[in-house]
Image (cartoon, grey):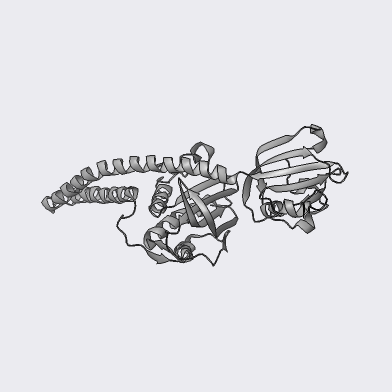
């Protein structure tokens, strides 16, 4: 049969598109929405028909009649989804008549993936530069520390009868040991650790058990797990340290506040990290409702010695990033007051079931 405009089911054709499409009638109410738009906006196509379009896209345009016959494109618009996630999109409005009825065609393009790849590339370079700097510095500091510690121990033996000297040398030894532990943290976890298959939820469960006594009553933890996530080959102890730093940061960000810390796990398919695409990636998102990361330090949070906390060492996030990088993954952050999320991407090794 020869296809003509009369026997084509246009709604079925539009439902086959990957681009989100909405048609708004002359009363500025939704007259049609394809499947891609419903999936992007996380709404039911049946329930949304007849609803004012501004309910879905608030604050985007004051009045669709204001731009006349021209096509209008708005970039960098954020959609707040029902599950509290945010997605960046570009929206194009065009005057469009359907069956003699005037209205507007709205095309929504999800730009989140593009932004994420750009941000990941920046974080990747930031991590490499910061890691090289901190390891060079740590190696330079470690040798003199060993010499100071050895000299202090020799002097303690020589001045065993002098309690005053012993007390001073004891302070020196303890401070040198503290600095040595700090340097070891800067160098990151051991490279030769044996990796075994573990469930990522075991790691989170262990960290929450360890941090439970520190959680104030005003903070609740909500777990939103995907139970289908396969086991990941990992250094279990190192991974605990990585998530311990992240969850403690979320807790400290909400100090004195009442609210939720949400830990969400998901699986992404055909996911790009840096220049490599993985068939399967586990994503752990840690969301807090704290005051947010100050803008002046946000771009540097994965550099060592950078902290927004008065008593922070600035090593927690770099160490966590280092551990995740050793597992082939990456940590990416987004933050504003009341909404801070650290997304941890951990790829499954190729060839694993």
Direction from residue 326 to residue 55 in the image, left or right: right
Give whichever of 48, 36 is nearer the camera: 36
Q: Quadrant of the N terminus?
A: bottom right
Residue visible at 46% across and 56% down? 346
Query: Across the whole image, how many numbered discs are drawn on residues?
Result: 0
Residue 328 lies, with reference to residue 111, above or below; the image says: below
Direction from residue 156 to residue 188 in the image, left or right: right
Q: Position of residue 154 (x, y in %)?
A: 13, 50
Residue visible at 25% across and 45% down? 142
Q: Is residue 292 visible?
A: no
Q: Position of residue 24 (x, y in %)?
A: 80, 45
Residue visible at 22% across and 47% down? 168
Q: Quadrant of the C terminus?
A: bottom left
| Quarter of the rendering containing residue 259 | bottom right
Q: Residue furthest left?
A: 158
Give whichever of 329, 318 is nearer the camera: 329
Q: Position of residue 179 (x, y in %)?
A: 29, 47
Q: Is residue 334 visible?
A: yes
Give whichever of 225, 257 is nearer the camera: 225
Residue visible at 59% across and 48% down? 339
Residue 349 lies, with reference to residue 293, above or below; the image says: below
Direction from residue 12 to residue 352 in the image, left or right: left
Q: Position of residue 153 (x, y in %)?
A: 16, 51
Direction from residue 152 to residue 63 in the image, left or right: right
Q: Residue furthest front?
A: 1
């Amino acid at each position: 049969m020869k296809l003509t405009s009369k026997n084509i089911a246009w709604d079925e054709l539009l439902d086959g598109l990957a681009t989100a499409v909405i048609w708004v009638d002359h009363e500025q109410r939704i007259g049609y929405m394809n499947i891609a738009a419903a999936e992007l906006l996380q709404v039911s196509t049946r329930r949304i028909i007849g609803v004012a379009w501004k309910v879905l896209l608030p604050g985007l345009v004051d009045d669709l009649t204001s731009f006349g016959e021209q096509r209008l494109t708005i970039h960098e618009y954020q959609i707040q989804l029902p599950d509290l996630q945010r997605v960046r999109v570009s929206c194009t409005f065009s005057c469009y008549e359907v069956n003699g009825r005037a209205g507007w065609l709205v095309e929504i393009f999800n730009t989140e993936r593009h932004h994420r790849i750009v941000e990941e590339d920046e974080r990747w370079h930031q991590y490499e530069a910061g890691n090289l700097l901190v390891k060079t510095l740590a190696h330079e500091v470690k040798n003199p520390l060993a010499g100071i510690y050895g000299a202090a121990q020799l002097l303690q033996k020589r001045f065993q009868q002098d309690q005053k000297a012993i007390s001073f040398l004891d302070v020196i030894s303890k401070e040198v040991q503290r600095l040595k532990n700090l340097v070891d943290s800067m160098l990151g976890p051991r490279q030769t650790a044996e990796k075994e298959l573990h469930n990522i939820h075991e790691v989170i469960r262990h960290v929450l058990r360890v941090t439970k006594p520190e959680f104030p009553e005003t903070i609740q933890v909500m777990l939103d797990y995907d139970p289908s996530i396969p086991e990941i080959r990992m250094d279990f102890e190192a991974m605990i340290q990585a998530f311990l730093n992240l969850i403690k940061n979320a807790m400290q960000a909400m100090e004195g506040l009442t609210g939720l810390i949400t830990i969400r796990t998901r699986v992404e398919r055909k996911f790009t990290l840096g220049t490599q695409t993985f068939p399967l990636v586990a994503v752990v998102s840690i969301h807090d409702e704290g005051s947010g990361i100050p803008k002046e330090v946000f771009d540097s949070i994965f550099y060592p010695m950078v902290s927004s906390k008065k008593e922070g060492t600035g090593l927690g996030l770099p160490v966590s990033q280092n551990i995740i990088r050793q597992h082939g993954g990456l940590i990416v952050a987004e933050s504003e007051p009341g909404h801070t999320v650290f997304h941890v991407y951990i790829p499954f090794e190729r060839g694993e079931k």
